[in-house]
Amino acid sequence: MRAMDYRGPRRVRIQDKPMPVIQHPRDAIVRVTRSCICGSDLHLYHGMVPDTRVGMTFGHEFCGVVEAVGSAVENLSIGDRVMVPFNIACGQCHFCKQGLFGNCHESNAQATAVGGIFGYSHTAGGYDGGQAEYVRVPYADFGPTLIPDWMDPDDAVLLTDVVPTGYQAAEMGGIQKGDTVVVFGAGPVGLLAARSAWLFGAGRVIVIDHVEYRLEFARTYCPAEVYDFREIGDPVVFIKKLTDLGADVCIDAVGADASGNAWHTLFGKKLKLEAGNAVPLHWAINSVRKGGVVSIVGVYGPTGNVIPIGNVVNKGITIRANQASVKRLLPRLIDHVREGRIDPKAIITHRLPLEDVAEAYHLFSSKLDGCIKPMLVPTPD
Amino acid sequence: MSQNDKAISAAGTAVRTIDPTTVVGWGIDADPKNDPTWPMRDRSGDDGRGMDWTRPPVQTVDVEILQSVEHQRRPAVIGVSTPPSGVSGILRRQAFRLSESQWGHWLLLILADRVNSVEGLFADVGRGRMPNPLVEMGLVKRSHARPAAIATAALAVLGVVAIVRAARPRR
């Protein structure tokens, strides 16, 4: 089969690889019909996530058709159309029983800090991902969810990560009616976080970024007040002036690959002495009002970052963060899509064949051609 | 004795000595509504504090798996992509002697990743495949892969010639 093949920082290609096989009674093999590149894939692509091995296939946002099932999988049949949450979760460990499906303890040998994630380095379990024609799906009797007949697969594929991650970012903000919510980052997750903030009753939603076409998109899609941080001076002062006391909720929807601070860029992105550039988190902590909430869904590396933790204490800030628990959120999100409250596929700007995966990564990474969300089509429906 | 061995040994001799019910005032201010983890964490599904859940069937693996020293036991399901190999594999094995809490663990892994990308270039050449970085970086479209490969090869040859000439002792 054809599959994306990581060769080193900023280098990927298509390669013939062996077909995945059932290795566990709860496995399934899924033929991939849609596979998106996630902003967090760019952290891998840029060489920022430790234990990203040459030869690995990325891809944790995908949907497709069940091709084979293991002996213990009774709820799926060959031919079923499924969306596959990016979390690999057993559904029966201590954490899964509490709905923390991003923290499964039975899916990642290499690290205890995170559960298994498809195609996301060996730090997240060493599973090949869905930027391929076929993929092995562990715990297939628990994770994969049938795509409703009425649902467009372009919507379904975005329900495997970006929509639940954005939604959970807003949920973790504990937004109360009338709250002012500031979202750092107008990438796909930031857009969905801002859109979701309204569903929780926000009174004002502000999006901060520096990519003009994404801010323009956010202005109408979310909708939100949008600001380019290059034009507002110190973003923290700006937000304080805008809101008097600071925002009620700040959401970091950027993570390690942020721009906006020379020191963090040098130490975090160039020298790798921090786990990426944490400037959005820095701004979030300093922009939120005393007693406010900072919600983090931006992905950082596992080492450490320089952030003003003293201000977290002195301001009495509540920090909430996690990988999205996709399976927990899917029923509600499917309802939102059906009722037209969320329009996931509107963020897809590029649709490419799997063979063009190198071009797709370059477009997304360099923010060329108005790219917001590139989607690969490995096999036809 | 390594830090890990010391920690494992110390944990093995530690004894839980305090029965909370014997502490004056135990639980008197407990408030189930004071739960900042809701709704992410559903405590009603909590069946204990240890690792005593009914496990999924355990996957058998025939490749080398590097396991975090923080795990009490190997998880039931394992990713088997790209087992460690070569010099990068040696570095990764060293890294996994350290816990996830040690910076050395992650810095060694990042170093291994860089070594691994060089190993990948040699592996390509060893299989008779010329690396094509311009296409792999998405800078040149796939339809122009051949000219890009020729240009890369020509540049590589020129680079080698330039280095050799520069290194040659001058009379």
Image (spheres, coloured by chain):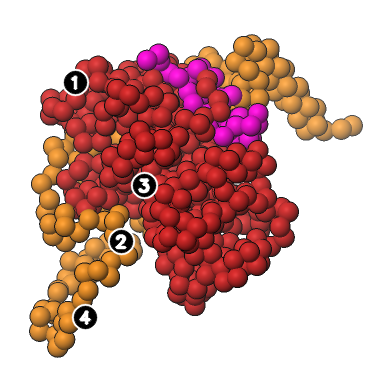
Chain colours: A red, B orange
To which chain does the residue with label 2 belong? B
Q: Amino acid at mark 4?
A: Asp
Residue A373 location, x and y as percent? 53, 32
Q: Are marks 4 and 3 on the same chain?
A: no
Per the image, the residue denoted by label 3 is A324
**The C terminus of chain A lies in quadrant:** top left
| A91 part of magenta stretch | no
Number of marks: 4
Residue matched to label 2? B37
Dot 1: chain letter: A
User: Residues at badges 1 and 3 in contact (C-beta under 8 Å)?
Assistant: no
Q: Nearer the viewer, residue A217 or B30?
A: A217
Would residue A219 be found to the left or right of residue A150 on screen? right
Kindly indicate whether the residue at mark 3 contacts the one at mark 4 (C-beta within 8 angstroms). Answer: no
Describe the element under mark 1 as helix, strand or loop.
loop
Q: Can you identify the residue that label 1 sits on?
A: A77
Q: Quadrant of the N terminus of chain A?
A: top left
What's drawn in magenta, residue-wise? Answer: A353-381
Mark 4 and mark 2: Cα distance apart in space: 18 Å
Q: CA distance from mark 1 to mark 3?
A: 27 Å
Marks 4/1: CA–CA distance: 51 Å
Location of residue A90 in the rendering, given as x and y in whole percent from the top left corner = 21, 41
Q: Earlier in the sequence, mark 1 or mark 3?
A: 1
- Residue A120 seen anywhere in this rendered image of the structure: no
Task: Give the residue number, with chain letter if any, for mark 4.
Answer: B29
Q: Are marks 2 and 3 on the same chain?
A: no
Q: Residues within 10 Å of mark 3 (few under 14, many from 20)?
A: many
Question: What residue is shown at x 66% (from left), y 20% (from top)?
Answer: B140
* Residue placed most toward the observer, A196 or B20: A196
Which mark sits nearer the N-terminus, 4 or 2?
4
Q: Amino acid at mark 1?
A: Ser
